[in-house]
Image (cartoon, helix red, strand yellow):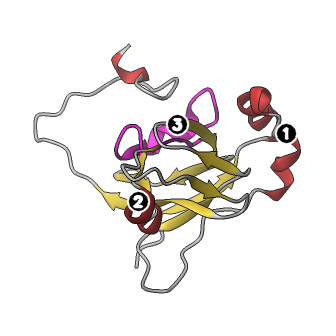
């Protein structure tokens, strides 16, 4: 296995900015860095910084407090944990979150957010306790085309490269 990345907390100041409307500033100390559950796991579990309850049709942006420093040529793909997707149809609003290596240097310190949605078709309520794994991230290498000419520099996230 190649060791190509490292998870870190965003600064306490950045977490405070991103959670001001949620009242989560005190949760900063309890943030746990993503971890694999077993030696055979591909995904790193991200843990909820707060209790979450989503009724069918409801959505919420969850500030994880996490950033990922990774080598160039790698991407972190984030998906719902399998059990939550299977049992409750929990989804990410953008289907799969793509965290690029240069996002680490964004103005928001590369703070990884997960916008989750309860797409239950059987009236199931999703209940996630603070500290429970809810999203998983998988590091993958990627390639570029022979005639690639990208020269842009990232400043933000969430569609910033098309602005």
Q: Answer with the quarter of the image where residue 105 lies.
A: top right
- Compared to residue 102, the image places residue 107 above or below, namely above
- Compared to residue 96, the image places residue 42 above or below, namely below
The residue stretch that appears in magenta: 92-117
Q: Residue 16's x, y, as percent?
A: 80, 33
Instruction: Kindly state the secondary structure of the residue where label 2 is placed.
Output: helix
Graded by Cα atoms within 10 Å as few (under 14), some (14 to 19) or many (20 or more), the crowding at tag 2 reads some
Q: Which residue is mark 2?
A: 85
Graded by Cα atoms within 10 Å as few (under 14), some (14 to 19) or many (20 or more), the crowding at tag 3 reads some
Of tags 2 and 1, which is closer to the observer? 2
Q: What residue is shown at x 40% (from left), y 61% (from top)? A: 139
Q: Quadrant of the N terminus?
A: bottom left
- Residue located farthest toward the front when viewing the structure as drawn: 123
Q: Which residue is mark 1?
A: 25
- Residue located farthest toward the left when viewing the structure as drawn: 146
Residues at discs 2 and 3 in contact (Cβ within 8 Å): no
Q: What residue is shown at x 58% (from left), y 36% (from top)? A: 61
Indicate which disc, 2 or 3, sits on the residue closer to the N terminus: 3
Indicate which disc, 1 or 3, sits on the residue closer to the N terminus: 1
Q: What residue is shown at x 11% (from left), y 34% (from top)? A: 147
Q: Is residue 51 left or right of residue 30?
A: left
Q: Residue 74's x, y, as percent?
A: 37, 54
Q: Which residue is mark 3?
A: 59
124, 78: nearer the viewer: 124
Q: Residue 119's x, y, as percent?
A: 40, 45
13, 56: nearer the viewer: 56
Q: Is residue 1 left or right of residue 59?
A: left
Of tags 1 and 3, which is closer to the observer? 3
Q: Is residue 136 left or right of residue 33?
A: left
Q: Answer with the quarter of the image where residue 17 lies.
A: top right
Graded by Cα atoms within 10 Å as few (under 14), some (14 to 19) or many (20 or more), the crowding at tag 1 reads some
């Amino acid at each position: 296995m190649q060791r190509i990345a490292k998870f870190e907390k965003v600064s306490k100041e950045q977490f405070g900015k991103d959670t001001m409307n949620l009242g989560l500033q005190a949760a900063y100390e309890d943030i746990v860095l993503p971890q694999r559950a077993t030696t055979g796991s591909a995904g790193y579990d991200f843990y909820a910084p707060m209790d979450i309850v989503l009724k069918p049709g409801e959505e919420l942006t969850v500030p994880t407090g996490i950033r990922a420093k990774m080598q160039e040529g790698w991407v972190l793909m984030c998906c719902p944990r399998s059990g939550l997707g299977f049992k409750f149809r929990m989804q990410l609003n953008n289907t799969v979150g793509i965290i690029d290596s240069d996002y680490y240097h964004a103005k928001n310190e590369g703070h990884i957010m997960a916008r989750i949605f309860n797409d239950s078709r059987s009236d199931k309520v999703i209940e996630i306790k603070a500290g429970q794994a809810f999203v998983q991230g998988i590091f993958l290498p990627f390639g570029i085309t022979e005639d690639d000419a990208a020269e842009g520099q990232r400043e933000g996230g969430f569609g910033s490269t098309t602005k």
